[in-house]
Amino acid sequence: MRLHQRVAVIGTALTVAVGGFTVLSAGVASAEPCGVTGVGSTPFGNIFGSSSFGSSGAGGSDPQGPQGALPDLGAGNTRAVSWVTGPRSPNSTYDRFGISGTDLGISWDNGKGQTLMAFGDTFGNCSVSAGQWRSNVLLRSNDSNLADGIDVPNAVPGDVDSGSPADVPNFSREIVNSLKIPEVESTTIPTSAISIGNDQYLNYMSVRSWGAPGRWVTNFSAIAKSSDNGQTWTTDQSTIRVNTGITLPGGGQVDRNQGKFQQVAYMKDRDGYVYQYGTPNGRFGAAYLSRFLPQDITTLGKYQYYTGAGTWSNNIADVKDTDVVVGDPVSEMSVAWNDYLKKYVMLYGNEVSGSIVARTADKPEGPWSGEKTLISRLQNNGGIYAPFIHPKSSGRDLYFTASQWSGYNVMIMRTDLDALR
C-alpha cells in the first residue's frame, strides 16, 4: 500500500470513528530504540506494573541491546531450547541481520518446505538515532531439526530464498511499511501468516496508539500478499477490516464486528478450509472464528463466521458478542492440528494470570478444553509472551517460538504434550 493510500484509509477510519478528520502533519516517530522510551504496551502488566513500553525492549547504551542468558524455567514440561534472534543467539542476528532486539517470530511453511518467520518492531544499533527501528522484518530457515534451535542462513540481497529480505548485506529491511506517526499509525505488526499456492499471505494490524499494559488501539487489520517468497509485499485494500466500533450500512469492511478480527491466527485444516481465529486489539479480548476456502482468502464476502451452536453465517453482522470459541483474556495465539494428541492445540498468553497456556479440541470450533499451563506466572521471569507453534512440529514434543520482554528477543521452546493428556 502506497503512502497516500495508507493515509487515506487511516483518515477514513478516523472520520468514521469521530465524525470528522483533521489533516495531521507527518512527523518523526517519537519512539526511542530498545525501550529507552516506550512505544507500546508491556505484556503481563500485572507482573511488570504500569510501565508503558511498546513492542520495543529495555535497552540502554549498549548498541546490541539488553539480551541476557536463555531463561531457565526450572522444573516442568516446558523449556527454552535456544535463542532465535539477538546478539547472543546462535544466529548472531545483530551482526548478520542488524537485529539487536525483536519479538513475535510468527512461523509458517512457505509451501516448499522452507519456514518463514515474521517479527514485530525490530531494532538494530541501539546507540544511534531511532535505533534502526523497523516495524517488522522477515527471516527464512530450512532447518527441520528443532531440538537444537533454528538455523537461519545469510541474507543475500536479491535472493528470495536467502535468510532475509535485504537491500544491503547484513541488514534485514522492513517488509510492510508504516507511517510511524504516533496517534495516527505508530507501527504495523504481523499477527499471522499462511501460504496458499505459490503465494504468501500476511495478516497484520495497523496500530494507532499504545496504551496501558496489554492494551492498544488499531486502525485496521489487513492482508498483505507476496508472490516472491516474502521478499516484497502488497496490501490488498479489499481485505482491510476497519476498527471503528460502529457499522456503516452496506459497508462490509466497516462493521463493529470487524473489531473482533484485528489480530488473527490462521489454521489450514484437513477439511479444506482455512480457519481464522480473531481477537480484538490488545490482550484482553475473547476469540472468535471464521473460515474460508483457500482461494477466497482475499474475498471477505465469502468468509463464513461461527455464530454458535455449530452454525455459520456469511454475514459478519450476525456474530454476537457471545459467539466466542474461547473466552477472554486471549493474547497473541496460534492453533494447529497435532498428530500425537489427535487434537487441535491452541497456545496463547493469559494476561491476567501472567502465564502461557494451551487448550485442546476435537474440532476447530471446539468445544475447547480448559486452560492448561505451560509456563506459570512464577516461572515467567522476564515476561515470556506470544507463543507461535512451529509448522514442523506435530509430535509429542511441541516446538513454538516465544518472546521474552526483558531481553526483547525470540526463542524456540519445547513442551512435552503428555502434560495435555
Image: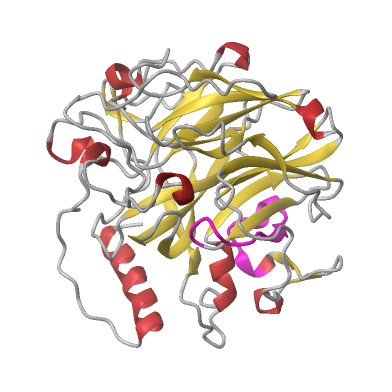
Is 20 positioned to the left or the right of 44 in the image? left
Q: Which quadrant of the figure has residue 218?
A: bottom left
Q: Is residue 139 above or below residue 56?
A: above
Res. 301 in view: yes
As rendered, which of 12 and 401 lies closer to the eye?
401
Q: Is residue 330 above or below residue 107?
A: below
Q: Which quadrant of the figure has residue 20?
A: bottom left
* Residue 166 inside the magenta-drawn segment: no
Q: Which stretch appears magenta?
A: 281-301
As rendered, which of 70 and 173 lies closer to the eye?
70
Classify the position of the N terminus by image quarter.
bottom left
What is the residue that sits farthest to the front in this orientation? Answer: 378
Q: Is residue 46 above or below residue 219?
A: above
**Residue 249 position within the rendered picture, expressed as x and y whole percent measured from the top left:** 56, 88
Q: Residue at x 33, y 31 (%)?
A: 101
**Residue 182 position within the rendered picture, expressed as x and y whole percent measured from the top left:** 25, 60
**Residue 74 position within the rendered picture, expressed as x and y whole percent measured from the top left:** 59, 20
Q: Residue at x 82, y 30 (%)?
A: 339
As rendered, which of 354 and 187 lies closer to the eye?
354
Q: Which quadrant of the figure has residue 396?
A: top right
**Residue 213 position within the rendered picture, expressed as x and y whole percent measured from the top left:** 41, 54
